Amino acid sequence: MAAWDLSITVEDLGPDAEPITISVTSDLHVGGVMARLVEKTQITRDWSDRALWWEQKQQWLLRTSWTLEKYGIHADARLLFTPQHKPLKLGLPNGITLKLLASFSSPVFSSVIGICKMLNIRRPEELSLLRPVEEKKKKKKDKDLTEEIYDLTEVPLTSGSRPCLYNGMPAHFADSPKMEAIYKMLSVTQPPPAPEVLAKQYRPSSVVDKAHINGRWLDSSRCLMQQGIQENDRLWLRFKYYTFYDIEPKYDVVRLTQLYEQARWAILLEDIDCTEEEMMLFGALQYHISKVSLSEPQMQISSPAMEDLELALQCLEVKMEGKSSSASELLENITAPELNDYLKIFRPKKLTLTPYKQYWFKFQDMVISSFKSKEESSGEPIQQINLKGCEVAPDVSLASQKFIIKLRIPAPEGMNEVHLRCENEQQYAQWMAACRLASKGKTLADSSFQSEIQSIHTFLAMQKTNSGTNSSAAAGDESINAYSLVSPRYHKKNKAKQLTPLILDACRNVAELSLTDAMLRFVQMWQALPDFGLSYVVVRFKGSRKDEVLGIAPNRLIRIDLGVGDVVQTWRYNNMKQWNVNWDIRQMAIEFEGNINIAFSCVTADCKIVHEFIGGYIFMSTRSREKSDTLNEDLFRKLTGGHEVH
Amino acid sequence: MDDLDAMFSDLLGEMDLLTQSLEQESASLPTTSTKKKKKEEEEEEEEEANFSIGFTDLNESLLELEDNDLDALMADLVADLSATEEKLAAEIEGLKVPSPTPLPSGLPAPPPKVLTSSSSDSPASPASSSFHTPTSSITSPLPPPPPQATKPTKEEIEAQLKADKIKLALEKLKEAKVKKLVVKVLMNDGSSKTLMVDERQTVREVLDNLFEKTHCDCSVAWSLFETNPELQLERSFEDHENLVEPLLAWTRDTENQILFKEWKQKYEVFKNPQTFYLWKKDKKTLKDINNKDKEILVQENFCGSSIIVPDLEGVLYLKEDGKKHWKQRLFQLRASGIYYVPKGKTKSSRDLICFLQLDNVNIYYGSDFKSKHKAPTDFCFVLKHPQIQKDSQYIKYLCCDDITSLNLWVTGIRIAKYGATLYNNFKAAEKKAVVDAAWTNRCTPSSSEQSTPSPTVKAKSLNQANGHATTIQNEPESKDFGNIPPPPPLLSSSSNILPPPPPDPAFPPPPPPDPAFPPPPPPDSAFHPPPPPAMDLPPPPPPPPEEDSIDAPPNFLPPPPPAVGSMLPPPPLSPYSGRSLPPPPPPSCFKGFNQSLPPPPPDPGFLPPPPPPQPLMTAGGVPPPPPPPPPPPPPAAASPTAAPRPSLRPVGSVKKMPPAPPKRTTPTLGGGGGGGGGDGGDLMSELMLAMQKKRGNN
């Protein structure tokens, strides 16, 4: 067979190096080509990750046993001998950017699996990569100055199924303090963003705006190189399919943290709508999470041995509590802490104009007793209020030194409203905390009393910084701007000092959650929003002349009329008989049971993306606990692949 | 604490003794048919509840109930007694010694049951408050007896001490603050059942309890409803709720009631999820939906990491605060609460106004609001804080167009409020229903009657079967005893012994009971409950005063003591021997006991009776007097006894009994306390009178 010359650019020789020419025959297989090439460079090094990339065809020559003839390669082919794994700047849901090596030669689906393995994120099939929203040039400059990129390119490429864990993190993070710090970035929530940052971020203002982001998803059945991604390009890693399977906080530290961050930003940037009450609760949870993550920096990083120890300690604690409860309960009750002080009381229900009256109050168990004076406090109280099950609301203004606790106490006849006015911050924090606990059926002896007081102080401090002129820096880490916790829409609607009590009020139900539970709660609340899980695409239905929006949810498709803004139709996947893509005219056709057929073309995203979403969700629904640990990549590819695969 | 613990273990030990003896007694009861036993047991179960002192508000109804139950119980017992007595009489005639033997066999049967119920209750109650399973442990079986007979004075003192300690322990337990209520539950058929509920019990447990008592199918639809006639509201408690807490919100003069009925909507959402989650679809699609799709819907909405609330949205009428107007508003249900769309705004989330968050309110059905509140329709629901019992501006009244919409909203709100708990409740209820169905299937073939449905019942039936076998064996034995004085001798011996010493006399009567209730002495506390049985045994009247425990046996005892007394003087030893004897018979009783016992556990509530303890204490003082009575019984002997029973039957006496029961229970609680309260004494004396009359006639 005739030999001919094939010139190949070897990337490792530098950008300016001339291509190396080797003499080949058409029946030489690709492996042989590479062997000769390496030989010719006369460089000894590890070439194992290198492969040939055929530029004209935008194709990797990964089958080393195929001959050049079989690949159809002739002398005019421009071949590049280049590493399959290349560095990528990866933006995570929590906003930090990593630099890591990703596979540029395998389908994106597999690349993501590799990335997730490195980052210790389980269930990689739920995530994918997308092209970031371009920032305006000005901003980009600013950002480049400030943005820190955490380098993970040193991490060896593992081939094992799961990285072994060391101290609860993959071994490669335990190599150096620097790596450990990076792992912490992944597994600890970020502090709330500065309000200015938040305000500057792009927020979609309509469903159509929200649809645009979905045009940016990479095709998961093709590789990065094929999609024009180059070394050191920037991509985002995000949860794409909103079915978070089998979240296990013990193993899912990074996954849960990133999920929380994605949810948080979705809320803050109004990617998903919620009501004001919900927003306040989201704000309260963020506040609580940021507070707790500061106070327990060594969060979940624990080895199995440590877990055992912890478990044992817990058991011990339970036992001791159990023992003491019977015996010492009496004692405890006798010595139960109480609050005693002069407060002013006011009953708004009576239509009189009686001002606040001062009494001596005693708070014990869950009951407030009032006496005429301190001296008479040993006698019969004038009145007793049992706070169990009552509603507690603050009415506080630091500027006017107003510290009022509003109580609504349920009684057979209705709610009795009582306002207690405290003299100062200290007194208010204590009594407010006591009322909060009592309303939940807990006494002052409860362990959460002190933390409750603390959180009230913190919120008062917040109010100070918000209301004061910008001399707030002194407040330190503890102070958080209420504007950082809610979406910018509420910045206009409420002044910060109005916002603070609202968030504080919402906080009462979450104040005792652990960091993990709080994050889980946040994610659950997010999932419970009516519009959760919808990915929008602007489409044009067959026979229709106007653009409409298709919402793709984990279990259904919805059709939204842009004129009305309402859902006009819903189709559930489990009624779906088949779906087809006509790749030539880029149209999707779906058939549902009952002879329902729909067809549409996609406007804001390639129909491959829509096809992949639907196939992906169907794939997600096939996951079950039994086969939980093995990911059926083939099935995913079949469901999402498109024409290249069929 | 140590003290307390020690007291407790003592108490437990005594209870064990009691149960053992009871078992034996029951075993020795050959005559009673299983059927009867069953009946009795059932009644006993109910009685237990009745015994306990109820909620003040419920007291009246309770008392009524008790009357009914007691009447039935008494009738049964009396029948049994007369049967056994006749037997005994026959045997006794053959024997020189009155009939220690016959008595044990015959008497134990009826009293034991009663006693068991009561005694078991009492022990169970204290135990339950602090520990869950007191009855089963067999710590110190014998210890109790010693205090009783042998050395009267010393023993008495010890007993007194013990009683004091127990009382103390009970008081401390009481301080543990476990609240218990006696609750009257109205059934579908207009009848009612009374239950003891403690604050740790969930509605699910109470329902299970009711399943056992009613032998209904255990479908998941069964619910406990709370009604508020004043507001014309009702709502079903959710299975996970603790029953006591909402009941505590009722006012003293409340007319609220608890109903036990089927509520199809309870778990409808898990059976036909499409109705709620696809409510926008047309009816035909919903109807045609297949089971697999239903399953998928349940999975999607309840088995994910977050519970999905149906996206309800619709126009409802809202009654304006304090006015009679009903205003239409577009409402939306979200996981975070109920919202409405303000006038002139869009349905966008950000514009919604929060109408209500669900943390602090419960949802109720309103009935006949058309006339009460001039509502547009009668499909109304209400949201209010559970504490609110009267009309108030804080109650939110809402009205739907039709029943479908009403069911949608009520269920939707429940899902939003209870989330995954609701699904877990359903699964638990379903499990129960399946198990139950299985049981019924298995049980039906067997001869056992109604009881089959619940597993516990099964246990009972099994026990009974065993009981039969044992009883048969026992019967011969007992007969032998009858023929062969030995057993009686023991008893008699004890009685003999007792008679000699003055205090003993009082105790002697107990010996007869011993056969039935060997543990009596320590059991005193436990025995107190028995007093009721004593009632059954009118003859004993004299003994009752002496010792509650004795009460039951007294009837029989009286006869034996005379004979025994004369026959066997051996004082100290006898008591023990007597005790030892009793055990044998118990086996059968025990089974009976077990059956009766199972129910009690659920009603740890028995503790409440503690108040009675005081009576007991006083009773302690009383006991001495009883001794004298023993003598009277002797004359009656076996033959008279038969006659007296009939006298007992008189309904009148029975009726009186009802009031007494509570007191008895209290004594039990007292545990340490002396004989039954004054009431018990009165009853006993009445019974005695009756018996004497009869005897006189004879």
Image (spheres, coloured by chain):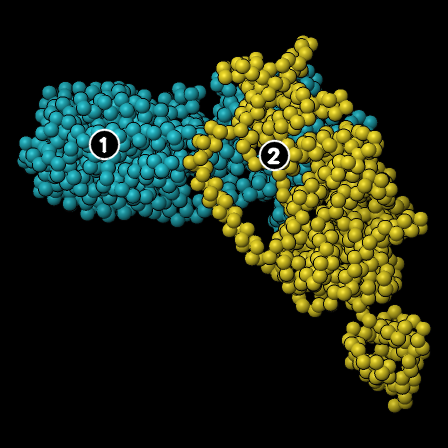
Image height of A170 relative to B209, above or below:
below
Task: Say if residue B360 shows up in the picture.
Answer: no
Answer with left or right where residue B175 lies relative to residue A244: left
Q: How many marks?
A: 2
Q: Secondary structure at mark 2?
A: helix
Task: Find the distance from the CA under tag 1 to the CA under tag 2.
Answer: 50 Å
Q: Nearer the viewer, residue A632 or A87?
A: A87
Picture residue at 14% right of the left edge, 23% below the top: B628
Residue B121 image-quadrant placement: top left
Q: Residue at x 35, y 32 (%)?
A: B169
Q: What's the amino acid at mark 2?
A: Gln
**Which quarter of the image is occupied by the N terminus of chain B?**
top left
Percent across and percent down for residue B124 are: 35, 36
Q: Position of residue B609 (x, y in %)?
A: 36, 27
Residue at the (32%, 21%) spot, across then down: B659
**Residue occupying image coordinates x 57% and y 13%:** A372
Q: Nearer the viewer, residue A498 or A642?
A: A498
Q: Quadrant of residue A507?
A: top right
**Residue A645 or residue B251, whichever sits in front:** B251
Instruction: Name the quadrant of the C terminus of chain B.
Output: top left
| Label 2 Cα crowd, 10 Å radius (few <14 / some 14-19 / many 20+) | some
User: Is residue A398 rendered to the left or right of residue A18?
Assistant: left
Q: Position of residue B140 (x, y in %)?
A: 27, 42
**Circle number at residue A450:** 2
Residue A12 falls left or right of residue B75: right
Specify the chain shown as cyan.
Answer: B
Q: Chain of mark 1?
A: B
Numbered label attached to residue B158: 1
Q: Chain of mark 2?
A: A
Chain letter, yellow: A
Depth check, front residue: B277 or B350: B350
Q: Amino acid at mark 1?
A: Glu
